[in-house]
Each structure stands twice: as C-alpha cells, then as structure tokens.
Image (spheres, helix red, strand yellow):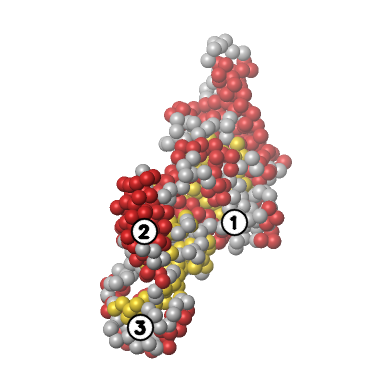
Amino acid sequence: MSTTIIDRIKKEIEGLKIDAIPEEVGVVISVGDGIAEIEGLSRAQMMEMVVFEAGEGAPLEKTVANDKSLFGLILNLEEDTVKVVVLGESNLVKEGMRVRRTNRLLSVPVGPAIVGRVVNALGEMIDGKGEIKTDRDMPIERVAYGVMDRSSVNEPIHTGIKAIDSMIPIGRGQRELIIGDRGTGKTTIAIDTIINQKYEPKEKRPICIYVAIGQKRSKTASIMAKLEEAGALEYTTIVATSAAEASPLLFLAPFTGVAIGEYFMEQGKDVVIVFDDLSKHAVAYRQMSLLLRRPPGREAYPGDIFYLHSRLLERSAKLSKELGGGSITALPIIETQEGDVSAYIPTNVISITDGQIFLETDLFNKGIRPALNVGISVSRVGSSAQTKAMKKVAGKIRLELAQFRELEAFMQFASDLDEDTKKRIDSGRKYVELLKQKQNNPMPFYQQVVSIYAANNGLFEGTTPNMVSQIETQFLSFIARDRADILTTIETGCELTDEVVAKLNQAMADFREANSQFYGLVK
Amino acid sequence: MKQAYINALADALLSKTEFESALRNTHDLLLKKGHGRLWPAILRGVIKEIEKRNRQNTPQVIVSTDDLKQNEALIKALKEVGAATTDYNTLVDSTIIGGFIVRYRDLMVDASYKRALTDLYRKIIKS
C-alpha cells in the first residue's frame, strides 16, 4: 500500500506545474473582537469569502502541520478598507497578515449524505462520524423564489400535537412562529414535530433541519439524543452553533440551514426547518453590527434587522409543480420576556410569518401542556392545507374552547350556574384535558381525528375531566386492536366518510359498554 | 479628520514641496484650529502612509536566494500584475524554497515551490 502512495506522490510531483495566476490580496491593518480591517481588496464583493495567509513566513513543514484554512467573510465595503468577520479563531489573525480573495461567495457544501449528521455554521461535520460526501455548494445568501415560482400552500405538515393540528394547522411551505417565554415548551413543540414525521409515509416524509443558534452544547446534545432515540435523526440534519462561538457564526447558522433546505427543496422534496431561536440570532447580529461600527437603531439593533429576518424566512416556500413542487416549512422560535409580544424582535417576526403559536407561562404552570394560548395563536394559511378528516372534526373545538374561556371568567363571579352553563364548562374542561399531551409523544393525525371525533360525540359524557386522558388512551388502543381498519381508512383516505363515521359510532358504543367502570361517576 | 491631515501632509511631502516648510505649515494650521494634540499621531500616520505608498508603487519580488535570475515566468508575472519588468525591489525569504512571489498594489502572483507543495499536500490529503 505504501508503494502505491509513493508512486502516486511521485506521479503528482512529475506533473506539478506552477501556475502564475494573479490573485488579489490585502493586508490586515487591525483586528479585534473577531473583526479584521483589511486594506486593499478593492474589487472584493459583499459576502465574499477571503482566506487569511496564516502560513506566510513559516517553513513548509510548519505550514503543512498547521494546515487549516482560516476564512473570513466580507461584510463591510468601505472607502479604503473592507471589514471582515473571522470565521474561526480570530486570535490567529495578526496585523500585517496577507488576506487573499477566493472569488466565491460564502457557500455551504451539501449532498444527500448530510441528512442524519450534525454540522457547524460552515457546513463542516462536528459529530465525529467522518467526512460528509457532498455534491454541490449552495450559496448561503440568495434571493428567495419569486411569486411565479411558487404555488399556494395546500398540503399539511402534521406536528403530532392535537391542539396545533386541529386548531392551528400548518401547511408545507408555511412559516409558523413559535413564541413564548423561556421554559414554556417552544423547543419541545419543534422537536415533537420532527419526531412526528416518522409516521409519514417515506415518500412524503419531509427532511428536517434543526438549527441551534447560540444554544448550550448540552441542550443540543440532549436534542440529538432524543431524536436518535425516537428514530428521527435518520431524516434530520442538525446545524449547531453554541453560545461559546463567535457572533458571526451564530449569524450564519440559520442561513446555512436554509441553504441546506433549498438543496433538497430543489429536488422536489419537502423540508421542515426549525430556527431555535431567532431572538439569539438577532442579538448575535446586533453584536456583530456594533463591532462593524454600523449605526445602531432601536434597542441598539441595526436598521436592517427586519430585513435580516424577512430575507431568511422568505426563503421558505412551496415551489410550483414546474420547479418540482418541493417546499420549506419554517418554524422560527422567538423567546419573549415576561410574555411581552409587543417587543421589537417579536413584532418583527410576527409580521413576517404566516401565523404564530403562542405559549404561556401561566398555562404551563397550571399543567396545561402544550401551554398553547388558543385565543391569540393563529395560522393564516394552514387551514387550506388541513386534511378533510381533521377539518370535519376540528371545527367544533375552537368554538367550544372560546365559549369555555368566556364562561370560565364569568364563573369566578357567579356561584349559581344554570344546567346549560355547567354543561358547557364541563365540556370545555374535558376538551382542555383532551388537548394535553406529554412531551416527545406526538400522535399521528389519524389517531387525533379519532380522538377528537370521539370527544365531539360524547365519549367523555358521564365521566369527570380527570378521566379523559385515561379513557382516550384506552379507546385508542381498543380501536388499534379491534377496529384497525378505521385508522387505516382515515390514514390512506384522509377523509371521514359516512362509512367510517358509522364504524366509529359503533366502536364508541361498544367501548362504553365494555368499560362501564369509567362512566356513571357523575350524578 | 486625522486621516485627512495625514493624507494631505503625505501628498505634500511626496510632491517635493520643501520638507521643513510643509511640516511647519501643517503644524501651524493644527495649532490655529486647536488640533495641536493630534500632531504626534499625524506624524506617525504620515510615516506609515508614505511607507504604504512606496510599497504599493514599487513591485516586490520575493525569492528564496540572493541570485535572482530573470526568467520568462517572472517577466510574465510582472506583466500580469501590471508592473514594470525592470524596476522592482527584491526580498529574500528562504521559506518559499524556490520560485518567486510578485506583489504589486493589490495583486500577487505566487509561483513559489512552497505554495505548489502545500497545494499538492492538500490535494493528496483530501483525496
């Protein structure tokens, strides 16, 4: 084997040709906080990559031993200089160091093998599973698809969360914001959505991308472990940047994620991308902009912070049939402070996205999980993507819950309630219980349809709200065991036909008869 | 503002204006405008600026040994960067092993053996 290597090296040396090609170079005149100011490079482009000549003046053996290219990204073009963010260890950059143009805009190498892997903001693997074979470089910054290239959102993406799939449906190609205070379950919803995709048939299963922006490494590791345990990592790519990394890498991470997503979208595949979270992204961009001496605006954010997020989220799309029909569904996450959705970054992202899932600390503390505030959570385009079966059963829930909320407030003042009001309150409580779901336990949509249909049609009548969860579990296992054809029909047809309805009614009656111990508890 | 003074003084000194009068006039102007405290920094800046301009206006040829032989490749490289083929500064850097590097203004032609060998190393390691 060693002979082969030597032969090969000999052959390469024989064919060695020194090309005298002029390259544009600049000189570092100052460096600090990860930002280098470079003189020269008068023809450089915005967002172009440059390479720092770290090996200049060093002997060959040292250059080869420390052979790791140090790249920079041009972000400011000024009169005599350019400002570059160092994409790596900025302490290696020294004054007087030469910087070479690469003539290529920042791009990320992608290929089918990137699925199931963990990469950094530059697309380099960080999971220790070996090099990733790639076949293309996708530009990190790119203009989003135009109006004529898109088609309307008409296919659902199932999150596996009853409250979302029934009342705030999300379509493929939609941008749905997940917003809430810290510790309210934002990441859980995103991770459950990724896990739930395993229930989708393989040919329709979207590729998932989880972008961790400035997260703790322990959190990213636990998310990776959760996905692996659930069997979801095989169709997921994680783009991880930790809180310890330089702000330019945090700024790049979501763009890297969406560039990977676009690679698959252009092949006609569906992609779900989670940006966790854009509040930290905005903070990283603010830090970088201040170091680049760009003028600060409101809350010291630069003036183009809205444009930053809008151009990122605008890249999620549902492509037309002519372009393959692929899609990118974006689930950006925003962390609020004290539930204040009217702060600068939350309002920006709310206005960019096609709806929001609002999570509340109070509900979370009451044990209502997911802690979804149904009143202010909306999906602006998703209802047209909802399956017929879900549409048929879900319409009633929103109304019931709205009435329940009104009555709940009224209940605090009045002690004597009439029978009808009591019934409505009881029904509302049962719906609230029904919509509770355990962490990392998404439910396939056909089971959701059965569950909600049963609730609408009196499966929980004659029982107490605290029994709802138990009855639901028992009923679903009864259906899966004895009436599996109901689930299969709903899964394949996505419709609730009269025949299925009849079978469901029969199943409910049989279940009630066989499980009388659950009923008759309420006088 | 400091850079404007630096550029103006460097221009004056390089345009063969009398050295002493250029310095004196600039200093007087600074005092008159109340910017006298900038004087030491301006002087340091002017030295850097003149060095930079000299570096930019004269091509540099870096070789590994003293005995530079003008060959076709070097002349071609000088032409490629738009420099005169006869008037250049020669620097010796033994770490480049062989060949040459030409630098002129923003452009560089690296025809050194070190670069070629580093590229070869990367190619072999990558494949």
Q: Amino acid at mark 1?
A: Val
Q: Residues within 10 Å of mark 3 (few under 14, many from 20)?
A: many
Q: Is residue A12 something that shows in the picture?
A: yes
Secondary structure type for disc 1: loop
**Residue under circle 3?**
B99
User: Which callout, 3 or 1, points to the residue nearer the camera?
Assistant: 3
Mark pair 2, 3: CA separation: 44 Å
Chain letter for mark 1, please: A
Identify the residue shown where x is 40% and y is 61%.
B12
Q: Are marks 3 and 1 on the same chain?
A: no
User: Which callout, 2 or 3, points to the residue nearer the camera?
Assistant: 2
Q: Amino acid at mark 3?
A: Gly
Mark pair 3, 1: CA separation: 44 Å
Chain letter for mark 3, please: B
| Figure disc tally | 3
Q: Nearer the viewer, residue A321 or A161?
A: A321
Residue A339 vs A158, above or below: the answer is above
Q: Residues within 10 Å of mark 2 (few under 14, many from 20)?
A: some
Query: Which mark, by number, is residue A40?
Result: none
Chain letter for mark 2, please: B
Q: Amino acid at mark 2?
A: Ala
Residue A296 vs A209, above or below: the answer is above
Mark pair 1, 2: CA separation: 53 Å
**Residue under circle 1?**
A143
**Residue under circle 2?**
B22
Identify the residue shown where x is 32% and y is 51%.
B39
Q: Are marks 1 and 2 on the same chain?
A: no
Identify the residue shown where x is 43% and y is 70%.
B105
